[in-house]
Amino acid sequence: MTLTIPANRSIMAVADEAGVPIMYSCEEGTCGSCETAVLDGQPDHRDFVLTDAERVAGKSMMVCVSRARSPRLILDA
């Protein structure tokens, strides 16, 4: 499934509307419930959960608050 995420919306909100089941709780990037694996692309981490090393690795992201740095981001949701 390919979704276009507008700058003013979260990945989670758009995915939820499209019927993609994502676990979440806080919607503030503090609980880690929405952690999603990144298969390709570079996330723009805006959460308070991941360590600096995890952010650099770019293998997961919190889709409730984080965005994409790269033009395309492929997630395993």
Image (cartoon, rainbow, N blue to C red):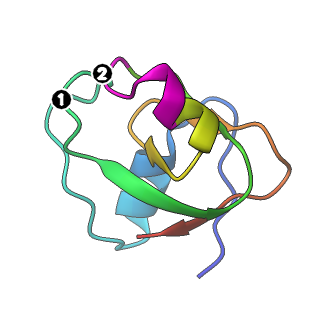
Separation of marks 2 and 1 at Cα, in angstroms: 8 Å
In the rendered view, does 52 fall on the left or right side of 24?
A: right
Disc 1 on helix, strand or loop?
loop
The quadrant holding residue 16 is bottom left
Q: Where is residue 6 in the image (x, y as percent from the top left)?
A: 68, 42
What quarter of the picture does the N terminus occupy?
Answer: bottom right
State yes or no: discs 2 and 1 in contact (Cβ < 8 Å): yes
Return the residue at label 2. 28
Q: Position of residue 9 (x, y in %)?
A: 55, 36
Disc 2 on helix, strand or loop?
loop
- Residue at image x 50%, y 39%? 10
Q: Position of residue 59 (x, y in %)?
A: 53, 53
Return the residue at label 1. 31
- Residue at image x 50%, y 21%? 52
- Residue at image x 38%, y 37%? 64
Residue most toward the bottom? 1
- Residue at image x 23%, y 37%? 32
Residue situated in front as seen by the camera: 40 or 54: 54
The quadrant holding residue 50 is top left
- Above or below residue 14? Residue 57 is above
Range drawn in magenta:
48-54
Q: Neighbour class for label 2 at 10 Å: few (<14), some, many (≥20)?
A: some
Residue most toward the right? 71
In the rendered view, does 46 fall on the left or right side of 6?
A: left
Q: Position of residue 26 (x, y in %)?
A: 17, 28
- Above or below residue 28? Residue 19 is below
**Residue 52 inside the magenta-drawn segment:** yes
Residue situated in front as seen by the camera: 47 or 28: 47
Question: Tag 1: residue type?
Answer: Cys
